[in-house]
Image: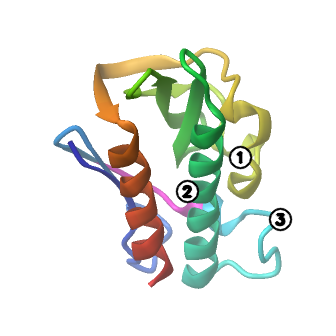
């Protein structure tokens, strides 16, 4: 059961972030990644988008590695005007229970490079599809592979 988050630069900052999860694909915009105020604030180009997406994925790894059994983390992947898309990851003994969903938290209301407290406490998360169990190392390796692709 693969997970990947990639940037497919098409020069528009729209329809260029691709989440593949549980045999399905969702396409999102990189617009708010390019506007991030903390990482390379003076630029809005593909290189910056890659750097911010890499930082998003790094935050995913950081929060997942902090979780204890039954703890929950929320991993953002879709930053839109009126909502955000997230993966909810519940730590289990031998892995994670992962569900895709969304929240009314707007994509412009926080910097993707500094997700902060939302990684652990996201109000109004709504699942959109089934939850899938993933072994710990499979999930972490999927994220590391996404980071590698984003960096190249």
Q: Which of marks 3 and 1 is in front?
A: 3
Q: Earlier in the sequence, mark 3 or mark 2?
A: 3
Give the crowd class for mark 2: few <14, some 14-19, many >=20 residues within 10 Å.
many
**Residue 57 has which mark?**
2
Instruction: Report the Cα–Cα distance between label 3 and label 2.
Output: 16 Å
For image coordinates 77% across by 51% down, the residue present is 114
Res. 139 image quadrant = top left
Q: Which residue is drawn at 71% across and 65% down?
A: 35
Determine whether label 3 and label 2 are within 8 Å by CB. no
Q: Residue 15: percent from the left, percent from the top?
A: 38, 60
Mark 1: secondary structure: helix
Report which residue position mark 3 lands on: 38
Say whether residue 78 is left or right of residue 62: left
- Density class for disc 1 (Cα within 10 Å; few <14, some 14-19, many ≥20) is some
* Range of residues picked out in magenta: 26-31
Front residue of 14 and 85: 85
């Amino acid at each position: 059961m693969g997970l990947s988050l990639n940037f497919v630069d098409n020069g528009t900052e729209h329809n260029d972030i691709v989440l593949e999860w549980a045999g399905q694909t969702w396409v999102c915009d990189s617009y708010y990644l390019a506007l991030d105020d903390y990482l390379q604030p003076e630029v809005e180009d593909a290189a910056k988008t890659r750097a911010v997406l890499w930082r998003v994925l790094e935050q995913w790894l950081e929060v997942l590695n902090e979780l204890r059994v039954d703890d929950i983390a929320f991993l953002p992947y879709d930053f839109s005007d009126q909502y955000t898309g997230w993966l909810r990851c519940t730590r289990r003994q031998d892995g994670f229970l992962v569900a895709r969903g969304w929240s009314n938290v707007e994509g412009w209301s926080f910097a993707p490079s500094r997700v902060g407290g939302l990684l652990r406490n996201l109000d109004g998360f709504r699942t959109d599809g089934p939850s899938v169990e993933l072994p710990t190392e499979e999930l972490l390796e999927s994220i590391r592979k996404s980071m590698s692709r984003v960096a190249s």
